[in-house]
Each structure stands twice: as C-alpha cells, then as structure tokens.
Image (spheres, helix red, strand yellow):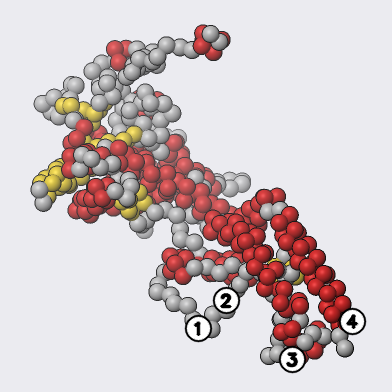
C-alpha cells in the first residue's frame, strides 16, 4: 500500500451540500426569516426597496449607456444549433427555434437583460399545445419587485393574500437568473445599479448646486435699507419691494428707505460642469467598461480597443441569458417532446464577420506560395456560386531541381524539345535523344512522394491558419519535421545516374565512326 492509497479519502457521498444557507447556517446573514434579504448593503440602508435603483435608471446618462449595451445584444443574430448531427437532435433544435420565433426572442432578451442592471430577472413561461407537441405560448418578464427568495433560494411570488412567505414559483413555469454577486449564496445577485447609485447621486446634487450658483451669481441680490425707527409694517413693505425686483417691472418704497443691488464677487470658477462630465464618464465605465462609445474621446487605436471591450461585455451578456435559457426552458422543451434528444444550444452571433478584402489578400498570398484553394472553400468563404475560369492558372507541385527564390517555389527552366529549338540550342542538346531529357521524368516521379507529403503538411497548416502571421509561425514550427534526407538521397541518386550516363555518352561518342 502506497502513501497515496493511505491518504486517499473515502468514496464521496452524492448530493451532499454542507455549506448551505438553510436553517441559519449562513453566519453572514442576520435574522433569517422565511424570506431571504438581499445582501446589498446600499439597498439594505434604504429599506431593501428596488425603487431606489429604479430612480437610478431614470438618469438620462444611465439609460443611454445601458441602452447601448442592451441593443447591442438584440441587434445580433440568434441561432439554435442541434447538439449533434443525429436526426432527433435536429428535430429538437427546429422545435426550439420555432417556439422562440413565436414568443419573440429579441423582445424577451431585451427585458431579461435588465437583470444585469438590478442583479436578477424573473419571467413566467406560459405553455400551450402546438401541433401535438408542448410549445411556448408566451414568455412574460415580470417585475422583479414582486418576487423574493426563500431560505432554500427558491423563487416566491408575493401577493396581497400571501405576503409571507409568498407563493412558490415552480420551475417549469418560471425562468429566472441572477448575476453580479461574488458567491452562490446570494440569489438576488448584485447588479450594475449598485455601482451607478453614487455617480448618479453626486451628479444630481451637483446639478442642484449648479442651478443655485447660476441663480445667485447670474442676478444681483436686492438690498433694502430702513431707518432705525421703522415699524414692522414698514420693514415688511420694504422686503416685498426687494422681492418685486425679480418679477415686476416697477416697485415703490417708503420715503426714507433706500434700495440697491449687490453684485456677488467671486474669484475662480465654479466647475460644476466638470463634476457632471466626470460622473457621466464614471457611469459609462461601469456599464460599458469604457467611455469611448458614449463620449468623443481618444484616437482610432483607443476607439478600436474600447470597442473590443464593449464587445466582450455584450458577448458575456448574451451568453448569460442564452445559457440560462438553455439550462431551463430549452432543456424542458426537449425532454417533453424528444426524450431521446440532447438539448440544443441557443446563442447569439456576437463576433463581427471577417473582412472579406483582408481574407482575399491573405488567400492571394497563400496562392503565390504554391497553393490554390478548392472551389468549396471559395464558396464557403465568399458565398455565391463560383466556377473556375478557362484561363485560371494552374500551380503544379514544384518539380525536382526547381530553384528557390526568397522561399517561394520557382518553376524549373523549360525542358529542351524540338518544339523549343531556342532552348535546345541554348542548352547544347539535341532534343529527344538527350540523356537528361530522358532521366528528368524518372527523377520527378521518384521525388513526387516526398513533395506530396510536404505539400500535404503545408496544406493542413494553410487550412487551419487564421492569419499570415499564424501560418508563418506554424511553418517554422513544422520545419524540423520536414527533413531533407529523402530529398537528398533521391537527388544524389539522380546525380550519380546522370554522371554515369554522361560517361557512357562520352564512351559511345569516342567509339563512334
């Protein structure tokens, strides 16, 4: 028995959960009644009322940046892919897609996305019989303020007839998710509103002081002077006269009393505008991860980087909602209608399509290296219906003895033949009777397996590479696995044979009459 066997624990108990929040086992919570209280401290100080965050949502900047993030999801195309190529899995995927079309998946996604702001979202799933199968009649997103979670973290609906502990929301009829919390003990999640509360409060208070500043320093203050023996009525008349300066075109004062306008002197500037801009930028960073898409700042490089940041958030939101649906409603529909099928995958295509011009440039560079794409690749990549032209150049495998210029294969010089007398004269050979002409096809034939293997390896790299840089790195990595031993052996044999053939020619010529 080894030390590993001694330290090996016993077989685990299945479905055992120790650190639950039931029966007061969570020491981080206070009094544990029939319903759980959100652990959002900011919300706790304000009576656990989500209307506090609804007021945050009424801030124009918050609504603007949150709308950017929400609409960026619904503008993306959504798809339903089967779990496999099995017929039953494809049928399950078709069913789910039709049902999402019926209920309006974009509208459902738009409303469920508010769970990212509040921390959680809940919807009621209404079923109906469709063509003899269980289908979706509607998915209605409900106001989250109507729900609470009990000690078992199960969703409950509060009604006037049952405020405590509320009505249990059975799983098949309700779909909900939570996000933002840093642990699984918080079923309410922690939404963006938690971090948007303070920037919103500071901005609104700053705006109030800004208006006060504009009123105070935009219009002089009226001051009245009364004698020491003035009566209370005379003082009241003077005060009314000073107030009339703001709204009336004329006013009177008793004799012996004076009035003047005091202009406030102030050094420096009241930079409330800077406070407002900073709070707007803080809101944009909380929601979008940056401020570029809501404020005109930065150069092109910064714009591209910050666009990628927002795309990451959009993809995360889309995956959150789709994954929650796949694990609940999507799985239920599949099990009820196709018990032998695996649940399909609902997702959104967030990635932007690759630039076809860049792809064409890359393919052209690869073509110049000696590889041509298949017709299927052209159609799959660029779409449409393509057929090869009659004048399309054909790139053949590099023949034996071809020269290499800057790493690119260059065809060997033309073989001398009677149809090419100039070449025959330049090489000093007599055409078909030349030994080199007769031996070249044989050497090429022996070299073909080696070249075919190399070309196959390179073709695999080209098919898998997503950029020229990736292809370059892959070729350099493959180089040690492409030895020249076979090539050198065949080439040496060809040179030896050519040498012997040349000596035989000299012997024959010497013995000729």
- Say which of marks 4 and 2 sits in front: 4
- Say which of marks 4 and 1 sits in front: 4
- Identify the residue shown where x is 73% and y is 78%: 437
Between the residue at mark 3 and the residue at mark 1, the CA separation in whole angstroms equals 28 Å
Name the side, left or right, on which 406 lies relative to 41: right
Q: Does residue 197 appear in this view? A: no
Label 2 sits on a secondary structure element that is loop
On residue 394, the disc is 2
Label 4 sits on a secondary structure element that is helix
Pick whichever, 68 or 201, lies toward us. Answer: 68
Marked residue nearer the N-terminal end (3 or 2) = 2
Q: Residues within 10 Å of mark 2 (few under 14, many from 20)?
A: few
- Identify the residue shown where x is 65% and y is 60%: 450
- In the rendered image, which residue does mark 3 sit on? 421
Name the side, left or right, on which 504 lies relative to 148: right
Between the residue at mark 4 and the residue at mark 3, the CA separation in whole angstroms equals 26 Å
- Identify the residue shown where x is 60% and y is 73%: 395
Q: Is residue 158 above or below residue 140?
A: above
Between the residue at mark 2 and the residue at mark 1, the CA separation in whole angstroms equals 10 Å
Pick whichever, 253 or 13, lies toward us. Answer: 13
Name the side, left or right, on which 203 lies relative to 108: right
Horizontal and vertical percent position of residue 231: 36, 35
- In the rendered image, which residue does mark 1 sit on? 390
Check whether the beta carbons of the residues at disc 4 and disc 3 lie within 8 A of each other. no
Label 3 sits on a secondary structure element that is helix
């Amino acid at each position: 028995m080894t030390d590993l066997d001694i330290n090996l624990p016993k077989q685990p108990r299945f479905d055992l959960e120790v650190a639950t929040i039931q029966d007061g086992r969570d020491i981080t919570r206070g009094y544990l009644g029939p319903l759980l209280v959100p652990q959002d401290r900011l919300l706790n100080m304000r009576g656990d009322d989500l209307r506090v965050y609804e007021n945050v949502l009424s801030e124009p900047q918050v609504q603007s940046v949150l709308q950017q993030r929400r609409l960026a999801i619904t503008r993306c195309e959504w798809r339903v892919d089967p779990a496999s190529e099995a017929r039953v899995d494809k049928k399950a995927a078709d069913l789910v897609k039709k049902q999402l079309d019926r209920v309006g998946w974009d509208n459902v996604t738009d409303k469920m996305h508010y769970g990212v702001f509040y921390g959680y979202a809940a919807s009621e799933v209404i079923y109906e019989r469709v063509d003899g199968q269980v289908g979706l009649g509607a998915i209605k997103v409900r106001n989250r303020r109507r729900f609470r979670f009990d000690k078992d973290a199960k969703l409950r609906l509060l009604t006037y007839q049952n405020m405590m502990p509320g009505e249990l929301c059975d799983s098949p009829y309700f779909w909900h998710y939570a996000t933002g919390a840093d642990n699984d003990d918080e079923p309410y999640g922690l939404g963006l509103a938690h971090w948007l509360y303070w920037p919103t409060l500071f901005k609104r208070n700053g705006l109030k002081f800004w208006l006060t500043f504009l009123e105070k320093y935009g219009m002089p203050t009226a001051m009245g002077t009364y004698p020491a023996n003035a009566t209370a009525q005379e003082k009241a008349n003077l005060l009314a006269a000073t107030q009339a300066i703001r709204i009336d075109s004329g006013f009177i004062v008793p004799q012996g009393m004076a009035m003047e306008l005091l202009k406030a002197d102030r050094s420096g500037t009241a930079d409330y505008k800077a406070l407002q801009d900073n709070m707007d930028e803080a809101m944009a960073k909380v929601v979008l991860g940056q401020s570029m898409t809501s404020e005109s700042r930065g150069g092109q490089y910064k714009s591209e980087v910050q666009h990628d940041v927002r795309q990451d958030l959009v993809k995360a939101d889309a995956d959150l909602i789709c994954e929650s649906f796949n694990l609940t409603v999507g799985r239920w529909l599949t099990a009820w209608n196709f018990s032998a099928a695996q649940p399909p995958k609902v997702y959104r295509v967030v990635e932007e399509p690759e630039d076809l011009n860049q792809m064409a440039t890359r393919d052209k560079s690869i073509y110049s290296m000696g590889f041509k794409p298949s017709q299927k690749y052209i159609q799959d990549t660029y779409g449409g219906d393509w057929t090869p032209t009659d004048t399309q150049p054909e790139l053949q495998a590099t023949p034996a003895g071809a020269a290499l210029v800057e790493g690119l294969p260059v065809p060997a010089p033309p073989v001398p033949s009677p149809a090419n007398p100039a070449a025959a004269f330049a090489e000093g050979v007599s055409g078909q009777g030349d030994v080199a002409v007769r031996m070249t096809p044989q050497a090429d034939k022996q070299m073909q397996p080696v070249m075919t293997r190399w070309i196959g390896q390179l073709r695999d790299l080209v098919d898998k590479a997503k950029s020229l840089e990736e292809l370059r790195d892959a070729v350099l990595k493959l180089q040690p696995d492409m030895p020249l031993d076979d090539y050198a052996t065949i080439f040496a044999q060809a040179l030896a044979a050519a040498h012997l053939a040349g000596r035989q020619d000299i012997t024959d010529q010497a013995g000729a009459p």
